[in-house]
Image (spheres, grey):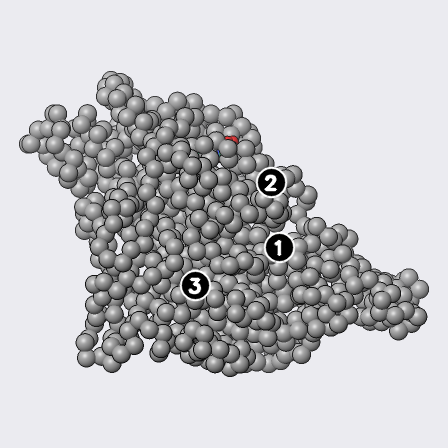
Amino acid sequence: MSDLLKNPVLGNDDIKSEIDGKLQQEEIKFEGTSKAEEREKEMAPPNSIHRSGSRPQLDVSGAAIQGNFEEKDPTILLPNQSDDISHLALDIGGSLIKLVYFSRHEDKSVEDKRKRSLKQRFGIPNGNRRSYPILGGRLHFVKFETAKINECLDFIRSKQLHCGGMVARWPSDGMTNENVVVKATGGGAFKYTDLFKERLGVSLDKEDEMDCLVSGANFLLKAIRHEAFTHMEGQKEFVQIDQNDLFPYLLVNIGSGVSMIKVDGDGEFQRVSGTNVGGGTYWGLGKLLTKCKSFDDLLELSQRGDNSTIDMLVGDIYGGMDYSKIGLSASTIASSFGKAISENKELEDYRPEDISLSLLRMISYNIGQIAYLNALRFGLKRIFFGGFFIRGHAYTMDTISFAVDFWSKGGAKAMFLRHEGFLGALGAFMSYEKHGLDDVMVHQLVERFPMGAPYVGGKIHGPPLGDLNEKISWMEKFVQKGTEIIAPVPMSPPGTTGLGGFEVPLSRGDTLRSDASSLNVGVLHLVPTLDVFPLLADSKMYEPNTIDLSDHGELEYWLTVLSEHLPDLVDKAVASEGGTDDAKRRGDAFARAFSAHLARLMEEPAAYGKLGLANLLELREECLREFQFTDAYRSIKQRENEASLAVLPDLLMELDGMSEVDDFDVFKERMLGSGNTKPPPHKRALLFVDNSGADIVLGMLPLARELLRRGTEVVLVGNSLPALNDVTAMELPDIVAEAAKNCDILRRAAEAGGLLVDAMINIQDSSKDELPSVPLMVVENGCGSPCIDLRQVSSELAAAAKGADLIILEGMGRAIHTNFNARFKCDALKLAMVKNQRLAEKLLKGNIYDCVCRFEPAN
Ligand SMILES: CC(C)(COP(=O)(O)O)[C@@H](O)C(=O)NCCC(=O)O
Ligand SMILES: [Mn+2]
């Protein structure tokens, strides 16, 4: 099916950088429009990323009542409000405060003529974004120690999370906090009511803890693709939950104490059991026995422990033998802490490490066992474990998993949740009447992992980061201290507890993570305009990534490739911002941040969820944007486009002079037919374009022209945000307009597609009396990466796809790294140059710079 050919036109990454004008930084302002903002609006690509300014402020200019004036509490819209305004919910537990807040951003997408004409053509309804409730923004997850509640209050104040959200109540309470009510659950919601009123002026609206745990868990399991995972013998495996087959399940929440809840549906549950031996027990007893100051220290200690010095093992009783008749190996714990009774030792004679591990195993095993017995009692196959006791700690999870596996004889599996500690807080958030999350779909959520935000799923330390400058300083500080942020190093095999039965861990220390410093929780972006690409043959089975990074060798290889490319990318990024000192400082911070991501992923590949190469490449782009490099290749792209446009007329002449277009068997037959049969042209082709310059101008546009000539409508699908030298949807109309000056076919089609509205002035050979042409259109794909995950594309692409019967995916990122194995409902052509020797050999049995042309006709 796959042919390898040489093609000099596709792909071009070897381009030198050039200094470009620096983008002015965003200014937060209250009224009017600053020059900086006007400039940014002009330059911002559709749905451009938000550039966070300093502290969020309310801009009440232009405030207007939405809906009925007679209503008691009408909604007031703040049209000029441009920064984070949040909804906040809290879970105040005995040990930790968990906080979930939502920040909404101004919709910066530009409704230009191209978009208006697309909307008409594809029947996209106006305002597919609900004006209220809030949707389109970010969900943040933050935690604090309850003992340091003042830090939490400072954080809320500094971010103004207590200011009541996007709506103010009319008319009496306006923008003051007086009648602002914050949803809260957990015992602290009662205990700290007065403190919140005193310090922040807000009232805590108490929500039932069990209600919250269940609705938080249900939301996560339905809305996040890789939320649940199993953890056995050090191996983490993500589990795809079928939304329609979620219930019933047992939810085990391990906080200070433990609740076991049988969940039968949304809001349908029963607390069937629990145990008072939980996280508080581990911490409390551990503190007394080891003098450890914190839970995390205690957990850390356990990693160096050997519990056999203190636990009584089956072998201790049976003279080193297994008790195989009842399935107990010699190394099975017969009695936790049991050795202490027969030895003439005092507490000081035991190592704190051993005590901590013994305690951890005792408690985790006990919870796992009770959970399984309850699952058995109610015939539940699935058990999900949450709560901050787990802390992503490999040993804890392995111990719980072992207990469930052992007692169920392999019939039941323990599953864990990435947002383990935030179930209650999320549930409290869900209890706001209008939060907009009720019917969020998996494909509308994108998780991102911003760097430099110690409060975002990170360790509890330092003041909240306000702006980019603080973030950069934070990165610099870490580097100076030589801690945490380290360059990628050759890695050891993925961590394993080597549990292999309920035995002494074979490996510990470095390979066992306590994970207290990185909770593996990112920021959840809600993007209501994302859709599943409707032409996927089977969206449930679709896997965008071709290369599986769970293979250790692949992971190491690609992390090294990205690490080696970093200096060159930083040079380009800094040059794209004028090479100023500020740009250099940001470039440095970006390099450190991205290196830290790579180091983190080397250490724990599944830290950010299921990892594929596409995620890595996207992470790099996101990281660039985080440090305000909005388009590192901007001037390089421009120069390449200009150079290519200059030779386009010659190429078109050459192509027109050819008797037959270079082609391959099946595609050729589909396009040109054989013998006397002339196949009908495709109705509409979607061309997923890739790079700027020769790639688009001399490759994809001439291909589009051939299709148009045959009467096929052409939709050019470009990126929503810049990524490397990829051409964006915003840039395409100008490129097409330039190309159209040399080509009637392109010109008429672009005109018919609404692309040339403003750009028709200099057309040299326009004749007015031509027949109307099939249209050439441009849509954005919803991505800002060199790869594309077709489960999450823009609504305009999804709409355009509905009438398409040919898909052309072009470029290494879109056609090889992702979608190489994707199957579609219609004809699909995958074209790419392979710019990596190893990939060329392994995947295609070819060589670097070979080109792939893969044609897969519709079934
Ligand atoms: C980043 C890319 C996917 C972009 O390729 P494109 O999609 O533009 O063809 C590709 O250049 C890539 O995989 N680069 C790393 C390969 C290497 O340098 O070996
Ligand atoms: Mn590209």
In percent of the image, x 72 and y 70: which residue is there? 287
Q: Position of residue 243 (x, y in %)?
A: 47, 64
Q: Is residue 408 above or below residue 702?
A: below
Q: Residues within 10 Å of mark 2 (few under 14, many from 20)?
A: some
Q: Position of residue 346 (x, y in %)?
A: 88, 70
- Foreground mark, 2 or 3, reads 3
**Which quadrant is home to the N terminus?**
top left
Is residue 802 visible in this depiction of the protein? no
Does label 2 or label 1 sit earlier along the sequence?
1
Q: Amino acid at mark 3?
A: Ser
Q: Is mark 3 within 8 Å of ligand 1?
A: no
Estimate the spatial distance between the alpha carbons at disc 1 and disc 3, rounded to whole Å: 37 Å
Q: Residues within 10 Å of mark 1 (few under 14, many from 20)?
A: many
Instruction: Choose between 462 and 112: the one closer to the eye.
Output: 462
Q: Position of residue 504 (x, y in %)?
A: 79, 58
Secondary element at tag 2: loop
Q: Amino acid at mark 2?
A: Pro
Does label 1 or label 3 sit earlier along the sequence?
3
**Which quadrant is home to the C terminus?**
top left
Q: Amino acid at mark 1?
A: Lys
Secondary element at tag 1: strand
Would you say 591 lies left or right of 554 here? left
User: Which residue is the site of mark 1?
Assistant: 236
Q: Are marks 2 and 1 in contact (CB under 8 Å)?
A: no
Estimate the spatial distance between the alpha carbons at disc 2 and disc 1, rounded to whole Å: 22 Å
Q: Residues within 10 Å of mark 3 (few under 14, many from 20)?
A: some
Q: Quadrant of residue 175?
A: bottom left
In percent of the image, x 74 and y 61: which residue is there? 302
Q: Quadrant of residue 202?
A: bottom left
User: Which residue is the site of mark 3?
Assistant: 158
User: Which residue is the site of mark 2?
Assistant: 488
Q: Position of residue 385 (x, y in %)?
A: 60, 68
